[in-house]
Amino acid sequence: MIRRLLARLMPGRPAAKPRVFGPDKHSIRRSQLSAGARSVTRKLHEAGFEAFIVGGAVRDLLLGIEPKDFDIATNATPEQVKPLFRRAFIIGRRFRLVHVHAGAEVLEVSTYRAAQTGEDATDEHGRLLSDNVYGTQADDARRRDFTANALYFDPETETIVDYVGGVADVRARRLKLIGPPVTRFREDPVRMLRAVRLAAKLSLAIEPKTAAPIAKLAPLIQNVPPARLFDEMQKLLLSGHAAETLKSLRAHGLAHGLLPLLDVILEQPLGTRFIDAALANTDARVRADKGVSPAFLFATLLWHEVLVTWNARKAKGEKPLPALFEAMDSVLEAQAARIAIPRRFEATIKEIWSLQPRFEQRAGTRPYRLAEHPRFRAAYDFLLLRAESGEVPQALADWWTRFESAGPDEREAMLKPDEAPARKRRRSRSRGRKRSADSDGGAGDAPADGDAQDQADHAD
Ligand code: ATP
Ligand code: MG
C-alpha cells in the first residue's frame, strides 16, 4: 500500500495520461496488419471491449520492419475473450492468455496486467514470481520491458497510445527500459538478454542508463529456469543476427552464464573461427528465409567442448569412438543444467557429432552408406564448418562436396584405396554389409580405426 503510494509520488514516473498519436502523426496503417489481427480486434470491439495491437508489432511497424506476428491487448478477461471466437484456447498458468486461431494465424490475446507489488511478489533476488494480476492499460504499459515495446495501436482509429515515451525512443532508435533499470532487471534477468537481442536485431542503441547495470547483474541469469533460458537462446540464435548478438553478449558480460566455457572456446583460435563460421552461416540462412535447425546450431556451439573432452580421453588411451560418445554425453549433461536442451534436439545433436569420424572413411562402400544416412546433410554441413575453421583439411570437405554431386562412375573413381590388411576386400557399390576397416591414408586425415568404425556402424 505504502509502496504503491510512494511509487505514485516518485519523480520520473511516467504520466498516467498517455500521449495519443493520431494517424497524421505516424505512418502505421490498418492495412499493414494481418487479416487475423484485423478481424480479432474488430470482434472484440463489437463485443464492447478495447482491443489494441501491442508490443513488438507496433515497434517493428514504426521502424519500417514487417512484424513476424501480432499480439493483442484487451480489457476483456480470458473467459470473456474465449466465447467470442470459434477456435480460441486459454493457455498458460503463470500468465493466462488466449490463443485465437484465424485461418493459419494464431493471435495472442492478453488481458491488461498490472505489475505485481508487495513482499511476496519476488524471490530473494528480486525476481518476479507471478504476473497474473489484471490492471488498466496504463498499468499494462508500465509492466512491459522497453518503452519501444509498450505502444498500443488502435486499428479502429489508427492512433498510437503511448504512456512511456516509446514513440520518441523508437524514432531516436533507442532501447530504453521502463522504470529503474536495476529493479526491472532483477524482476526478470531475461530482460538483459532481450535488450541485447533486440538492439542487435533492430539496430537500436541500448540507452546508457539501461546498459549500465548489465555487467554487474549478469550473474542473475543463473536464477532463470533453464527452459526459459533455452527459449530465449533459441530466439537469439535464430534472429538472423546471431553473430552480432553473441558479440554483444560477450561485451556485456552475459555470454558466460549461457554456455559454460563459451569464453574459453572463443579464446581458442579454432573455436572462434568455427563459431563465427557457424553463426555467419545461420544468419545468412535466416535472412534468406531458409530453414535453420536449432539442433544443428547447438551442435556447433558445443562442438569444441566435445573436442576438448574427446581429445583428453583419447590422450588417456581410450578408444576413439567410445571416447567420443562419452564426451558427447558429458557435454550435453553439463549443458542441461544451464539451458534445458529439449530431448528431441539431443538425439539430432548426437547424430551430427557421431557421424563426423565417418567422413574420414573414403574407401569401399562406407562413403555410399554415409551419403544415404538420414542425417547426412546436416553432418556434411557441419563438416564444411569444421573445414572452414581449419579443424579438418579443406580437401576432405571438397572430396565430399564432389562425391555428393558425382555420378556413379566418378564416385567409383574417387574412392580411396582400401588398405585393410588381411580381411576380404571388396570395392563395389553394393549395399552389402562390409566389416573390414577402410583406411584412407590421405594427408592430414586421422588414421582409421577398425574397431571404432564398427561401433560407428552400430550407432546408425
Ligand atoms: P520479437 O520481435 O522478438 O517477438 P517482442 O517484443 O514481440 O519481440 P515477445 O516475446 O513476443 O517479444 O513479447 C511481446 C511483448 O511482451 C513485448 O513487446 C513486451 O511488451 C512484453 N514482454 C515480453 N517479455 C517481457 C519481459 N521479460 N518483461 C516485460 N515485458 C515483456
Ligand atoms: Mg513478438
Image (cartoon, rainbow, N blue to C red):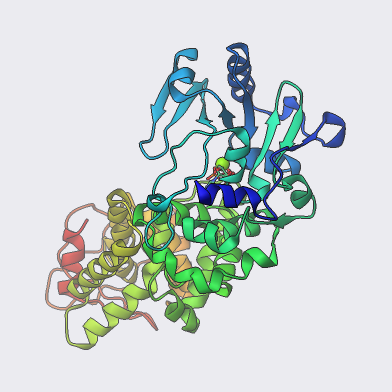
Residue closest to the far front: 2
Residue nearest the viewer, comparing 422 with 379:
379
Note whether residue 408 is visible: no
Residue at 29 percent of width and 60 percent of height: 350
Residue at 54 percent of width and 73 percent of height: 215
- Find residue 225 and report its image quarter: bottom left
Q: Is residue 162 above or below residue 450?
A: above
Q: In this view, does 169 lie to the left or right of 200?
A: right
Q: In this view, does 184 lie to the left or right of 293?
A: right
Residue nearest the viewer, comparing 440 with 258:
258
Q: Is residue 155 above or below residue 274?
A: above
Task: Indicate the position of residue 11 as horizontal and vertical percent values.
Answer: 69, 55
Q: Quadrant of ligand 2?
A: top right
Note whether residue 140 is visible: yes
Residue at 63 percent of width and 56 percent of height: 177
Q: In this view, does 59 lie to the left or right of 134?
A: right
Number of marks: 0
Task: Indicate the position of residue 202 as horizontal and vertical percent values.
Answer: 68, 53
Task: Indicate the position of residue 314 as horizontal and vertical percent values.
Answer: 22, 83
Task: Indicate the position of residue 227 as horizontal and vertical percent values.
Answer: 35, 52
Q: Is residue 396 left or right of residue 282?
A: left
Residue nearest the viewer, comparing 155 with 311:
155
Q: In this view, does 243 lie above or below 445?
A: above
- Find residue 334 and report its image quarter: bottom left
